[in-house]
Image (tube, rainbow, N blue to C red):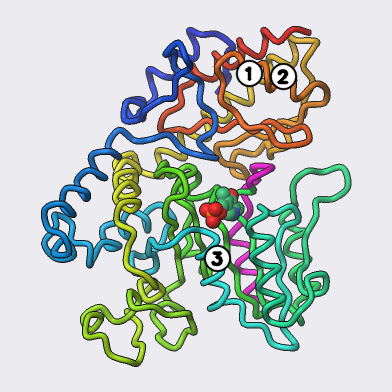
Amino acid sequence: MTFQYSRGFAHQLDEHDVLKDFRQWFHFPTNVSGETLLYFCGNSLGLQPRTAKQALDSELEDWAKFGVEGHFHGKKPWFHYHKFLSAHSAEIVGAKEHEVVVMNQLTVNLHLLMVSFYRPTQQKYKIIMEAGAFPSDMYAVESQVKFHGFNYDDAVIEIKPRNGEHTLRTEDILACIEDHKNELALVFFSGVQYYTGQLFDIKSITAKAHQVGALAGFDLAHTAGNVDIQLHDWHVDFAAWCSYKYLNSGPGNVSGIYIHEKHCMNEKTPRFAGWWGHKEDQRFLMKRGFIPEPGAAGWQMSNAPVFGMAVHAASLEIFHKAGITKIREKSKKLTAYLEYVINHVQEHHAGISFEIITPKNPDERGAQLSILIKENGKALFDHLTAKGVIADWREPNVIRLAPAPLYNRYDDIFALGEILKSFPS
Ligand SMILES: *Cc1c(COP(=O)(O)O)cnc(C)c1O
C-alpha cells in the first residue's frame, strides 16, 4: 500500500483498523498538565490494561474472605492458578497447552531451562548465541558454562553481523552451526533481538541445530505478544519470555515457559524440582520422592505468585480477544507506516540524519524500529521527550521506537513525525 504523510491519511487508517477499539482498554501516561503522552515503549514496559486492577482486587478479596481456603474455594482457586493462564499463553507462542506454564521470572526460568537442556559433555559443550545479546542472557549463559567447568571464550560462540551490517544473515547463523557441529550442545538465541529489532528465523535455526545433534532454545522477551510464532510445529526445544513487555502485565511480573512435548511429557527429563511441579493429585501428601506432573507444569517449583499472575491473566484475555494473527497483521502495517513517516521527515529535514538498523523486510522484524542517529542523537531524543514522546534511548546513538498494535494509532505516528520535524536544525 502507498502511504501518505498527512493527518487525514493517518485518521483514515485508524478508522479502518479492526483493532481500534482495543486502545480504550489501556491507561495512558500523562504529563504534569494531564495531557496524554505518545507512548512508544511497549517493547520495554507495556501499558496497563484497565482490567488489571479489578483482576488484582478480586484476588485480594478472596484472600480477605477465605484466607488459606482460597487455595480451593476462591473464585479462581489458587491451587490450580497456573492453569488459568496456559491456554492463552499457548495461543500466543503457538504451543500445545501442556507445553507451557507461567512461573517465576524470565532469567530465573532461563537458568532452570538450561539445567534441563544445557547438558554438556566433554565433546559437545558449546553454545551458539547472537553477539550483543541482552545482558541477562549473556550472564546466564556465562554462569552456566562456568558452572559446568568450561571457559566462556572457548564454550560460547557469539555470531556477529558482517562488517558494515547491523543484523545477522540466516545463512551465516546456519553456517556457524555447521562449522561447530562436533562440539555444539545448544543454540540459544533471542526471537526478536532487543537492540536491533531483528526477528530471527526460529524455524530454520531450530532445524539446523537438530540436524547437528544440538538443541535449540529461545528467549522470547521481545517476541511473545509481538510476532506470531509456532514453537510446537517448529520443534523448538524450549523457550521463555517475560510478561511485562509486549504482554502488558506490569513491571517485573511473571514469566512463561515452553518445553516441547517430546521433553516435557518425558518424566526422565532432568530438572530442578519443587513441590509445585510434583504430580498434582499427590502434591499435598507431602511425601518424599519427586514425581513430576506431566507437561511444562512439572517444571514449577514454588506455589503461584497469584497477584502478579492475576494481572497477567487479565492481559492475556485481551490478547485472546484480539487474536495474535490480527495483532501481527496490524503491527506490520503500523511499523511500516512508522518507517515511512520517519523516512519522510529525514528527506524533508536537513537537521536529521539517521539509519534504520532494523531489517526492512516486515517478516524479519516485529513492532520496533531501531534508529541509529548520525549526529546529535541525544539532543533529538531529548527533544522528543520534551514534546511528550516516550521512546527509548540506547547508548551510544540509538533510539528505539515500538508502536504497539493493541494501543498505538496511526495518528500517534503522524504526531511523532510532526514532532521530529520541529527539531531545530
Ligand atoms: C527484558 C529482557 C530480559 C529481562 O529479564 P528479567 O529476568 O525479566 O529481568 C531478559 N532477556 C531479554 C532478551 C530481555 O529482552
Which stretch is magenta? 194-211
How far separated are the C-alphas under marks 3 and 2?
36 Å
Q: Nearer the viewer, residue 139 or 2?
A: 139
**Disc nearer the start of the sequence (3/2):** 3
Say if disc 3 is inside 8 Å of ligand 1. Answer: yes
- In reply to whether residue 200 is colored magenta, the answer given is yes
Name the residue located 63 percent from the left edge and 26 percent from the top edge. Answer: 339
Which residue is identified by label 3?
A: 110
Asked if the residue at tag 1 contacts the one at tag 2, i.e. Cβ–Cβ closer than 8 Å, the answer is: yes
Q: Give the answer, above or below, for where 227 lies relative to 304.
A: above
SS for tag 1?
A: helix
- 210 and 398: which is toward the camera: 398
Q: In this figure, which residue is indicated by the disc labeled 1?
A: 384
Mark sitting earlier along the chain (1/3): 3
* Distance in Å between CA atoms under marks 2 and 1: 6 Å
Residue 389: horizontal and vertical position, in percent?
56, 20
Mark 1, Cα crowd under 10 Å, few <14 / some 14-19 / many 20+, is: some
Question: Residue 353 colored magenta?
Answer: no
Q: Secondary structure at mark 3?
A: helix
The amino acid beneath tag 2 is Leu
Image quarter where the C terminus lies is top right
Q: Is residue 183 left or right of residue 329?
A: right
Q: Are marks 1 and 3 in contact (CB under 8 Å)?
A: no
Q: Nearer the viewer, residue 20 or 64?
A: 64
**Residue at label 2?**
380
Mark 3: which amino acid? Answer: Leu
Residue appearing at x 41%, y 25% in the figure: 28
Ligand 1 within 8 Å, label 1 CB: no
